[in-house]
Amino acid sequence: MTPAPIALRHHQGRFVSFPQAYGGFNMQLWVNILLGTWLIASGLVLLGGIRFPGSGTVLAVLGIVTGILLFLVDRGGKLLPRMANILLGAWLVAAGLIPLLQIRFTGSGIILSVLSVAAGVFVLVRRV
């Protein structure tokens, strides 16, 4: 007896699992879902004051995992088109590790700021 798929989707007249409907496992899709979740949760914590015990740790780990997956999802091809994901991934990992491991050094804020600006520029350049 085969286990039932986690979720079904009607696709071309039949029901198939989500990965089958979308042509297999799509790592970029999951990275986008994690990144969107991290962005929403970060905004709710910072602006909405929505906190729970360990929320900082959860956000840090989610950012680190998302950053690592950004490195892994975009491994092939030329360096320049991948720079947005590389810089964004580096920023997510660094922004997660600094509070999680309580790393303090002079210039850490500047390094994070430069990484975020550079990632933003490459995201805009890639999309234009």
Image (cartoon, grey):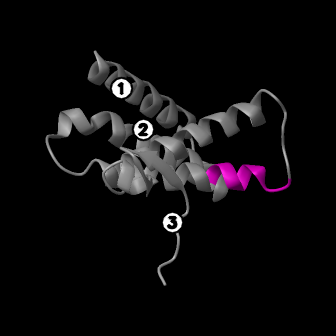
Instruction: Of the two numbered discs 2 and 3 on the same chain, state the one appearing first in sequence.
Output: 3
- What stretch of residues is rendered in magenta? 53-60
Circles 1, 2 touching at the beta carbon (< 8 Å): yes
The mark total stands at 3
Nearer the viewer's eye, disc 1 or disc 3?
3
Mark 1 neighbour density, 10 Å: few (under 14) some (14–19) many (20 or more): some
Nearer the viewer's eye, disc 2 or disc 3?
3
Under circle 3, the secondary element is loop
Label disc, if present, on residue 88 of the rendered structure: 2
| Residue under pointer 3 | 5
**Residue placed at 49% from the left, 49% from the top?**
9
Q: In the rendered view of the protein, which quadrant contains the C terminus?
A: top left
Mark 2 neighbour density, 10 Å: few (under 14) some (14–19) many (20 or more): many
* 41 vs 53: above or below: above
Q: Is residue 5 magenta?
A: no
Under circle 2, the secondary element is helix
- Can the viewer see residue 103? no
Circles 1, 3 touching at the beta carbon (< 8 Å): no
* Marks 1 and 3, how far apart at CA: 35 Å
